[in-house]
Amino acid sequence: MNLVFRPYTNTDAKDFASAVIASLDTLRPWLVWAHEDFTEAEARQWFATTHTLRQTGAANELGLFAEDGRLLGGAGLRYSSEQTHHCSIGYWVRSSEQGRGIASQAVRYLVDLAWQSPERDIVEILAAEENAASRRVATKCGADFIGIQYGLIMLDSGPVNTAIYHFRRPQ
Ligand SMILES: CC(C)(COP(=O)(O)OP(=O)(O)OC[C@H]1O[C@@H](n2cnc3c(N)ncnc32)[C@H](O)[C@@H]1OP(=O)(O)O)[C@@H](O)C(=O)NCCC(=O)NCCS
């Protein structure tokens, strides 16, 4: 499937909220912001945050869409203010569209985007140790497994063992 990557607009709010609510079975265990009462207003608030993050150079959060306009999920490149050579990727895909390579395509797109900034050398993915699907995405896209560190991710249950994956700028 060809994906369209673009910033969110307020007209996406309804689809975003309904995608989150329809995907709680897979999002809820791993994303603390996903909850059963997620509203269009919360979606618009998130979109406004993503625009600010982009303007300030803190992150590039994008919606993932099918060519026919369906909202499939979200993914973002987050920059580190302390380490300019370092950035990280986060992602989610609506439950009904998982297992079709969408997250992997988004990761490859964002990694390529990261290399367009000459100062970036490392792109990181952090996944809860038990989050097998997310870890598979990192591995499948060619990231190196660095190790497990406790507490880099906070779930509702508290801090958890976190798997660290790195992409390094191709020489
Ligand atoms: C992680 C997530 C984004 C993957 O999205 P996706 O579009 O299904 O990803 P892809 O189709 O590119 O790849 C998923 C891979 O994980 C595998 N997978 C899925 N569930 C799995 C499981 N329980 N155990 C092992 N592998 C699993 C799939 O088989 C596939 O690998 P394959 O192509 O080798 O068969 C999606 O599951 C999701 O949104 N999860 C909830 C949010 C989340 O965890 N985000 C990441 C936070 S770090």
Image (cartoon, rainbow, N blue to C red):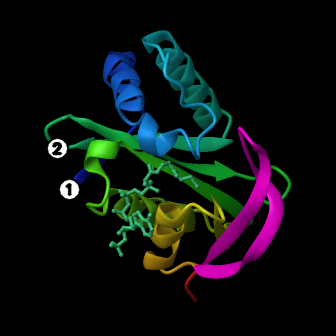
Dot 1: what SS?
loop
Q: Secondary structure at mark 2?
A: loop
Q: Residue at x 83, y 63 (%)?
A: 150
Q: Is mark 1 within 8 Å of ligand 1?
A: no
Q: Is residue 116 visible?
A: no
Image mark for residue 2: 1
Residue toward you, 155 or 75: 155
Residue in view at x 67 percent, y 59 percent? 87
Crowding around mark 1 (Cα neighbors within 10 Å: few <14, some 14 to 19, many 20+) is few
Decide which of tag 2 and tag 1 comes sooner along the chain.
1
| Observer able to see residue 146 | yes
| Pointers 2 and 1 in contact (C-beta within 8 Å) | yes
Lateral position of residue 74 relative to residue 57, left or right? left
Extreme residue toward the top, this view? 41
Q: Residue at x 38, y 18 (%)?
A: 13
Q: Is residue 147 above or below residue 55?
A: below
Circle 2 packing at 10 Å, graded few (<14), some (14-19), many (20+), is few
Span highlighted in magenta in the image: 144-168
Q: Where's residue 117, x and y in %?
A: 59, 62
Quarter occupied by residue 168: bottom right
Q: Residue at x 69, y 70 (%)?
A: 164
Q: Is residue 159 left or right of residue 18?
A: right
Q: Which label is found at residue 87?
A: none
Identify residue type, mark 1.
Answer: Asn
- Magenta-colored segment: predominant secondary structure: strand
- Point out residue 81 in the picture as x, y percentages from the top left corner: 80, 49
- Report the disc number at residue 67: 2
Is residue 153 found inside the magenta-colored segment of the image? yes
Which of the image's four quarters has the C terminus?
A: bottom right
Q: CA distance from mark 2 to mark 1?
A: 7 Å
Ligand 1 sits in quadrant: bottom left
The amino acid sitting under disc 2 is Glu
